[in-house]
Image (tube, rainbow, N blue to C red):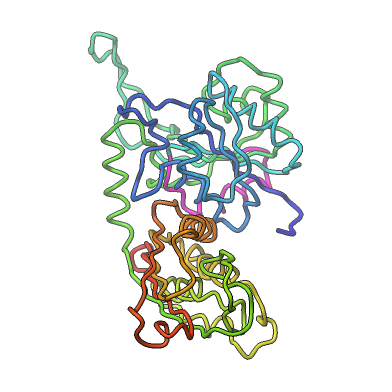
Amino acid sequence: MNRALRTVGLVVAAGHGERVGGSVPKQFRKLAGEAVVAHAAKALLNHPAVDDVVVVIAPEHREFYDQTCRHLPLLPPIEGGPARQDSVRRGLEALVSQAPNQILVHDAARPFLPGAVIDRLLAALREVPAALPVRPVTDSLKQVAADGKVTATVARNGLARAQTPQAFRFSDLLYGHRKLAGAGLGDDIAIAETIGLPILAVPGDESLFKITDPADLARAARHLTSTTETRTGTGFDVHRFGNGDHVMLCGVRVPHARGLVGHSDADVGLHAVTDAVLGAIADGDIGLHFPPDEPEWQGATSDRFLAHAAGRVRRRAGTIVNIDVTLVCQMPRITPFRGAMRQRLSEIVQIPLDAVSVKATTTEGLGFTGRCEGIAAQAMAGVRLPVGDA
């Protein structure tokens, strides 16, 4: 984006999350079909003021990362260190070549990040070099000894619970991490405190809770259920055969003796999916957003249409849950290209590969597809939107 300030999100996911249990670290556990870390990263990616996002991972977790995050347009992951402070410092050093002005350091285990919190943090950076979201402490605080005995009551006046992301002017945080390498400080605000940076606290959000144990995972699932609703949209499209030596289907070039005729690249699969996504959010159809009589779309690649529809979902704080498309034709054969089609759809709409289905069928020689006059496609898309979104 062409702005004076370049803002990057740094998601810290190098921990092992052992308190959640199981063989999969908590940041890579699935929550409504996507990994916890993917939810956290997407919240940053979807904010219009954030230019890029990178995830810091443990080297031994690269396979988990590839399986759960490769569909997202992230910068290449960075290998973390033995402690959180080491991981953040390595992330900052790797970002020097990106020349960011501002950095948002976020815990991967906090999957629900409202855009309004990012707004408040970036507004604070116009006044001070460091900011963090906080929530007030409402419970009574007690000092408890190792044997479980209460030894004192702690006054809660002026106390607050720190959340992430924590926001900084990049050069200040990089300087602090270099100066205090190995100090074992708990978070990045502690770095800022130690080097004397002014810090501003902004209101956080109760949805920004951190997942640390199985109960938190259950709470996260309940949170998604209570704050979102799932809608379904369908799409259908047809294109006839004409001259050519290939067809575009679901974003993949498929060799064929004939091409498909259309104002764009006539990708019948992507057109059907685009209509399904737009239908799920009641946002018209492909013809409304890309009128076929406008020269701008002559020969356009249809991935632009689907990416636009996916963007319309994200602007409403929604998520595409899954896509299912069926191609109807006698020829060409779809099976050899099915994997590539699923991968391309996953990339365009930024959802996991296992949430994308591509199928093919014939009409047993009946109708226009049976006579090899063209190809049809029907599609379904599930979309999760905040409750009350209209």
Return the residue nearer the eye: 244 or 163: 244
Residue 297 versus residue 201 in the image, above or below: below
Q: Is residue 300 left or right of residue 320?
A: right
Residue 145, percent across and down? 29, 11
Residue found farthest to the top = 147
Give, as a single range, the part of the protein colored magenta.
110-130
Q: Quadrant of residue 378?
A: bottom left
Residue 13 versus residue 371 in the image, above or below: above
Verify whether residue 120 appears in magenta: yes
Q: How many marks?
A: 0
Q: Is residue 240 left or right of residue 358?
A: right
Return the residue nearer the eye: 279 or 214: 279
Residue 310, percent across and down? 50, 65
Residue 303, percent across and down? 58, 68
Which residue is pictured at 59% across the width and 28% down the height? 79
Which residue is pictured at 59% across the width and 86% down the height? 291
Return the residue nearer the eye: 191 or 80: 80
Which residue is pictured at 39% across the width and 60% down the height? 357
Asked whether the viewer can see residue 390, the reply is no
Return the residue nearer the eye: 339 or 121: 339
Verify whether residue 233 appears in magenta: no
Residue 165 versus residue 86 in the image, above or below: below
Residue 241, percent across and down? 54, 83
In the rendered image, which quarter contains the C terminus?
Answer: bottom left
Asked whether the viewer can see residue 163, the reply is yes
Which residue is pictured at 38% across the width and 59% down the height? 321
Residue 373 versus residue 154 in the image, above or below: below
In the rendered image, which quarter contains the N terminus?
Answer: bottom right
